[in-house]
Amino acid sequence: MASPTPRETRDPVRRPWTVGAICAAAVAFDGYDVVVYGATLTSLREEWGLTPGQAGLVGSAALAGMLAGALAVGAVSARLGRRRTFIAAVAWFSALMVACAAAPSAMVFTALRVAAGVGLGAVLPLAAAMTVEHAPAARRNLAYVAMQTGFPVGGLAAALTAMAVLPDRSWHLLYLVAGLPLLTVVPAALAGLPESAEEPAAGARGRAGLALLFAPGTRAATLLFWAMSFCSLLFVYGANTWLPALMHDAGATVTRSLGFLLSFNAGAVLGGLLAGAAADRWGSRPVVAASFLLGAAGVAAFAYADSPAALLALAALTGYGAVATQTLINGWVTRHYPAAARTTGIGWSLGVGRLGAIAGPAVTGFIVAATGGGRAAFLLFAALAVLGAGFAAAVTARPHTG
């Protein structure tokens, strides 16, 4: 491994906090950009006359770009370096999200969301690898979860911004806000983000990749991680996309329906931080399995609850079981592999999981169109969470700790 440069060794005590803060900020805008579609879905359906099936397809098509970004990021960062790839990805998705504000039609809007998704899909694997690299070994779960909590914080910001803007102002403003990383995160990363000291040499890059993910002792865990991510991300993106619209269709005002989205992401933030500390103490496997089961119970109960207070509380529990569980999975995956395979490992886990993310909005939309409501979709989410708990319990390989 090459010796650290003066830039990399400067102020080593503060560097983990600097890296974690920059990565968390980028992931927060990633979360904002994903959740803002659900927050504006009612307005978009009204403006462009979208049916539930069409609205679901628009949401799913945008996630196809995230799949491409997640799968490609390992190879691209191996060639360009994590730092440069990270900065380019943040700048890319920010510029294209601003362009969404000027989209004249659903078709153009969808194309721009797909393109932005490439950058969105690349950011999380890079942020995961850099956070784990720089975090103290004894606190990697908590450091990772704290960084990844930026995603539901971004979701909270999307819900709060929508509550302030809609329905009195246009949805376009919400997409202009998504350009803020160009003025904040990108300059901060250019100034304060070091290049990774873990970057493998050129020959090692070629030998790493997928081969390390399927090496003896890791093959079964790799497949189980992929299955967990598929179940979890279908749950996350199906719920985050459709929750406000379903509550609005059920008679809630725009502001009240966005309140459920707010509660969903608040549960993810608070629960995720507690679960990260628990995973450091008891290990990822039992905490991930328990989180899946809590999410299953929450969303199943949500399907039948009718009290506004109960619905808000169950939305928070559901958010924990969906978003916070995926956060724990990502941290688990990142720590499981050696340094040479970290970005590839989390990239492919999220990439395969993005198939679930792509399916989530579309499947939910078709279920809503077929049944006239969201109960069947919520029960599907519960079943997937139970499956995810089983996959988590089946992982037996010990993680790489270096």
Image (cartoon, helix red, strand yellow):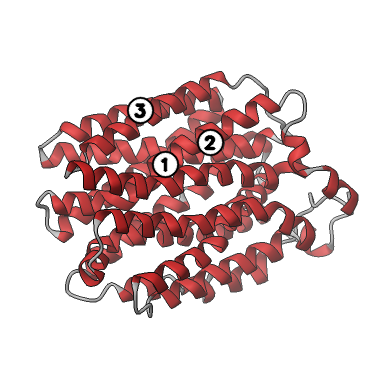
Dot 2: element:
helix
**Residue drawn at (56%, 19%) of the image:** 394
Q: Quadrant of residue 58?
A: bottom left
The residue identified by callout 1 is 234
Task: Determine whether, in the image, residue 341 is placed left or right of residue 276.
Answer: right
Q: Which x, y percent locates residue 137?
A: 68, 37
The residue identified by callout 3 is 383
The residue identified by callout 2 is 329
Of 131 and 308, which appears nearest the observer? 308
Q: Which amino acid type is shown beneath numbered disc 2? A: Ile
Q: CA distance from mark 1 to mark 2?
A: 14 Å
Q: Can residue 355 be seen from the camera position used here?
A: yes
Task: Determine whether, in the image, residue 306 is placed left or right of residue 134.
Answer: left
Dot 3: element:
helix
Q: Which amino acid type is shown beneath numbered disc 1? A: Leu
Q: Which x, y percent locates residue 178?
A: 43, 70
**Residue drawn at (21%, 35%) of the image:** 302
